[in-house]
């Protein structure tokens, strides 16, 4: 199984930014997903959850893909930014994400989902005409890996079977398999902010652009932060064992450095001497009014960063257990009962 996963990882387009410990985590997480899927593939088929037999459809493999938006210090609309607000969305800086997960419905109206997502966040002051941010001229991109465990409340479920066989003239109820749900949970996010300089993307955290860890500078930050997802979703039946849907997820983090911008400008002369000339150049890349951004002046705010996903989802029911006619849960082994 691990050899199969190693082969798959070679084709993940974001593999170059994964640290070793995240590679190991992803490897064993995907092993779990593939093993779980295997049970579902050889299990009996059944329709999706109904109000009478939801327990036959507890387990699902989930895939998602969509777009991302960064909500922080950089980029935004052509006006003063609003913290954490979707009203400050920077459309040209839209990124992408994709993920895989496992969903377990443990009660008719409650489920829990484990999700591993890979994404790209971006922000660029050149996308706004608001004078202070535009002249500041900062930008970033950051590959992110998010693992989160969330709790779902199925607020509305319309899950009814229609007629079971296609018999001419037979009448039956039209099938419905729709769910509307809300969710929240806890997660961890790996991030690595970068900026482009002379055609090359440079990692910003080692450059200490706000004097992180230096005398008089900001506090150093790490590449991992806790995160809390909040969201809503809608799902409907596609065919047989499959569902499609759409989800909107807002992630609140506990760092202000997803974009490497938080506090005030640091002395570029000290950065050039103690870190590198590259650090000094990227700490203040303003080309029109660099004098507006002297050491000690505001570079960002101290509000924690957030980001947003809008994803399409597809899920497969992988529950392989069936209910006997006495209501007991049994595994199908083939053959037939005695007469």
Image: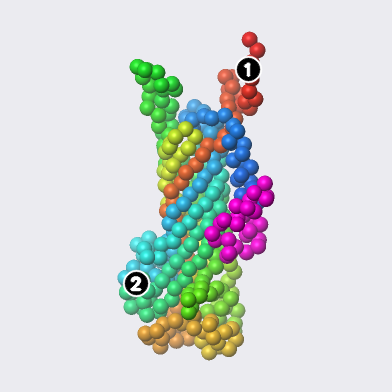
At mark 1, the secondary structure is loop
Reply above or below: 219 against 235.
Answer: below
The chief SS type of the magenta part is: helix
Would you say 329 lies left or right of 312 here?
Answer: right
In percent of width and height, residue 240 lies at: 47, 32
Task: Determine the residue positioned at 63% across, 58% down.
Answer: 23
Residue 185 in view in this figure: no
Which mark is first along the chain, 1 or 2? 2
Judged from this view, the residue extending furthest toward the top is: 339
Query: Could you tell me if the residues under marks 2 and 1 are in contact, i.e. CB atoms within 8 Å?
Result: no
Q: Which residue is mark 2?
A: 128
In percent of width and height, residue 82 lies at: 37, 67
**Quadrant hosting residue 72:** bottom left
Reply above or below: 4 against 241.
Answer: below
Would you say 290 lies left or right of 266 here?
Answer: left
Which of the image's four quarters has the C terminus? top right
**Quadrant hosting residue 160:** top left
Judged from this view, the residue extending furthest toward the right is: 2
**Front one among 278 and 128:** 278
2 vs 1, front mark = 1
- Rendered image: mark on residue 248: none
Residue density around tag 2, few if under 14, some if 14–19, many if 20 or more, within 10 Å: many
- Rendered image: mark on residue 336: 1
117 within the magenta span:
no
Task: Determine the residue positioned at 61% across, 49% down.
Answer: 30
Specify start and end residues of the magenta stretch as a single range: 1-26
At mark 2, the secondary structure is loop
């Amino acid at each position: 199984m691990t050899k199969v996963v190693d082969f798959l990882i070679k084709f993940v387009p974001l593999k170059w930014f994964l640290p070793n410990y995240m590679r190991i985590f992803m490897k064993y997480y995907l092993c779990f997903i593939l093993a779980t899927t295997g049970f579902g593939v050889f299990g009996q088929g059944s329709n999706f959850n109904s109000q009478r037999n939801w327990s036959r459809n507890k387990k699902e493999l989930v895939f998602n893909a969509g777009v991302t938006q960064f909500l922080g210090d950089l980029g935004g609309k052509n006006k003063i930014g609003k913290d954490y607000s979707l009203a400050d969305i920077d459309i040209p800086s839209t990124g992408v994400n994709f993920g895989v997960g496992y969903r377990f419905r443990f009660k008719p109206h409650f489920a829990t989902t484990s999700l591993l997502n890979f994404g790209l966040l971006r922000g660029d002051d050149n996308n706004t005409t608001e004078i202070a941010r535009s002249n500041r001229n900062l930008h970033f991109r950051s590959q992110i890996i998010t693992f989160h465990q969330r709790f779902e409340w199925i607020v509305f479920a319309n899950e009814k079977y229609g007629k079971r066989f296609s018999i001419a003239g037979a009448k039956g109820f039209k099938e419905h398999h729709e769910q509307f749900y809300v969710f929240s949970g806890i997660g961890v996010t790996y991030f690595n902010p970068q900026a482009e300089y002379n055609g090359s993307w440079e990692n910003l955290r080692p450059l200490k652009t706000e004097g992180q860890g230096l005398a008089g500078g900001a506090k150093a930050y790490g590449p991992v932060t806790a995160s809390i997802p909040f969201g809503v979703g809608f799902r409907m039946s596609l065919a047989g064992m499959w569902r499609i849907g759409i989800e909107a997820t807002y992630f609140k983090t506990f760092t202000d450095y997803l974009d490497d911008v938080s506090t005030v400008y640091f002395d570029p002369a000290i950065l050039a001497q103690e870190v590198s000339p590259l650090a000094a150049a990227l700490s203040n890349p303003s080309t029109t009014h660099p004098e507006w951004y002297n050491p000690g002046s505001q570079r960002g705010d101290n509000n924690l960063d957030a980001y947003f996903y809008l994803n399409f989802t597809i899920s497969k029911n992988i529950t392989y257990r069936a209910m006997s006619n006495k209501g007991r849960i049994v595994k199908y082994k083939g053959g037939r009962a005695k007469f």
